[in-house]
Amino acid sequence: MRFKFIALIAIVFTSAIFVTGIIVGDNKKLETPEAVAPPTLSGKYGFEGIRSTSGNSLLPVTESDSLVIREDSSFSYFLASKNNLLAQGTWEASEGQLVFHYTQPSDTTRFYEVTALSDSILAIREGSVQFSFQRIIPKKPFITSTKIEFAFSINHIGRGMMGLMLLVIIGYIFSKDKRNIKWKQIGIGLLFQLVIAFGVLHVKAVQTGIDAVSKLFVKLLGFTYEGSLFLFGSLVQNTDSFGYIFAFQVLPTVIFFSALTSLLYYYGILQKVVYAFAWVMRRTMGLSGAESLAAAGNIFLGQTEAPLLVKPYITGMTKSELLCLMSGGMATIAGGVLAAFITFLGDGNPAQELYFAKHLLAASVMSAPAAIISAKLLVPETKEVNTDMKISENKIGSNWLEAISNGTTDGLKLAINVGAMLLVFTAFIYMFNSFLGDFLGDVTGWNGKIAEFSNGQYKELSLQFILGYTLSPLTWLMGVDGADTLAVGQLLGEKTILNEFYAYTTMGNMIHSGAFLESRSAMIATYILCGFANFASIGIQIGGIGSLAPSRRGELSKLGLRALLAGTMASLFTAAIVGMLT
């Protein structure tokens, strides 16, 4: 009977999609960076060398050294080896000669002979000194349209259905009480997710709403940028180095959004939005009041802040409710962190930021019912539950200024914690990979075989290689393009073993370097990574929720691994459904 119900749900899913499907066309291949022939000297160049005419190096050059010749007749260049020299002024060219009229560091005019100029190189000579440059080709945008489209594909639907069934089977295998699984509740939860996804992808009114909220997020990112620019000056404008972007753009975003969230909480705005979401979930999925509030709260708040909404109820929660509370925290992300991820993936492109903002917002909303499905599969409810919905009143400040101040302090702590975690985890990854590649892979001769087997994608035995190949079949079922499954499998592994910040950082670098062959793969990866489901979060939840209900700390510890599994399953449920419809 149970399996008949699952089969019925599958048929309903497929039928609904066939009836409402709209053929949008073939997925567009991701365009990779390619050279564009410059009509003039203008462009950005990296220094290749400063040598004498006899070929001897006169000054060392670094990756940060650059020359920019602009179409408005201005120029600037930076040389670290000359005491971090920044020179600028205006330029003109005629008959094989380039003239620089300097205004900084001093007013002077210098003449250079252009000895080579092509699509990729520039060489100029002043007396016996030869300057050679490599043109930096601007990338074509990763996203050419911010529109989220609904597509009809039997291949995508088939893979998505297999992915959903696999996740349900995994939940059934690891269930603590298989007999009491409420299959109707599971089916409604999946249908709820499908409705949300269909609305985001196809219903114009929903798309307009998501678009408005996404634009608001991008606008708020602009305000954060202005604050960072005031405090850090030109350091914010250095987008060539990830370190600068992370330190002076991403981390300030976390701080600002934490303060903004506190202000919204102080005025009761956030609680009203949470209550509305909770009411819908309680009515549709038959949840307790506390479960509904916590699940809705996790859409906007972090995994340690959302439980504060139901603080009085935690001590009396059933095991199923407790797992639901933990799973919701694992499956969703907080508003401030979401804004940081938009910055990661946006790569400094406003259209790209808007595109990923839409998908991250959709992922956050869809993951709430997905977390409930996963939790109810693993630990079904067997007791009568309290359906009352009353948000716990937590004083966040005596006035709005104190609320902002407290939020800023909390955001600063989070930003420092995030930066420290990335530093430490990155160092450990390199240390572990050094052992795998330099020792184990070298001694056994696996490095060469791995390079040959992966067609050069992985040059030696590494954690990324292991995770990529282990999890790639699972990501294929979620709808990821076959050529990108290794990359997304690696990201899923990094998120689970390390954390979502590290994974999204890697994904941002992949986007920047053009590693994804299909933009759709990156979109699905956004859903797969959206959540706090990693081993570190188990400890965070035991400490955070345990401090609100010390008597439940032991049960929190026992449910930790199940919460991690439920959070991971929730992200995969969401990704599979989106993969079916795009």
Image (cartoon, rainbow, N blue to C red):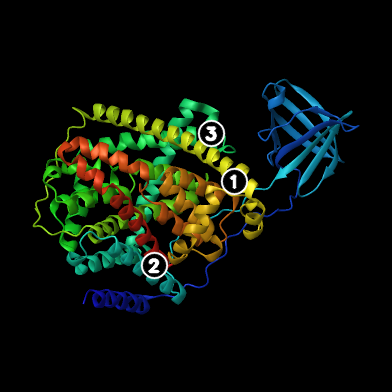
- Closer to the chain start, of discs 3 and 2, is 2
- Does the image show residue 145? no
Classify residue 400 by image quadrant.
Answer: top left
Please, what secondary structure does the residue beneath circle 3 have? helix
Q: Where is residue 241 in the image (x, y as percent from the top left)?
A: 58, 37
Residue bearing mark 2: 163
Q: What residue type is labelled 3?
A: Tyr
Determine whether, in the image, residue 290 is placed left or right of residue 15.
left
Above or below, comparing residue 305 to residue 580 in the picture: above
Classify residue 517 by image quadrant.
Answer: bottom right
Q: Position of residue 53 (x, y in %)?
A: 90, 32
Above or below, comparing residue 10 to residue 264 in the picture: below
Residue that appears at 36% across and 60% down: 574
Crowding near the residue tagged with mark 3, few <14, some 14–19, many ≥20 C-alpha atoms within 10 Å: some
Q: What residue type is labelled 1?
A: Leu
Residue bearing mark 1: 440
Determine whether, in the image, residue 237 is placed left or right of residue 185.
right
Q: Position of residue 377 (x, y in %)?
A: 25, 61
Please, what secondary structure does the residue beneath circle 1 have? helix
Q: Do the residues labelled 1 and 3 touch (CB within 8 Å)?
A: no
Crowding near the residue tagged with mark 1, few <14, some 14–19, many ≥20 C-alpha atoms within 10 Å: some
Residue that appears at 72% across and 44% down: 135
| Distance between mark 3 and mark 2 Cα atoms | 39 Å
| Distance between mark 1 and mark 2 Cα atoms | 35 Å
Q: Residue 133 carries which label?
A: none
Asked whether 125 or 561 is in front, the reply is 561
Q: Which mark is residue 244?
A: 3
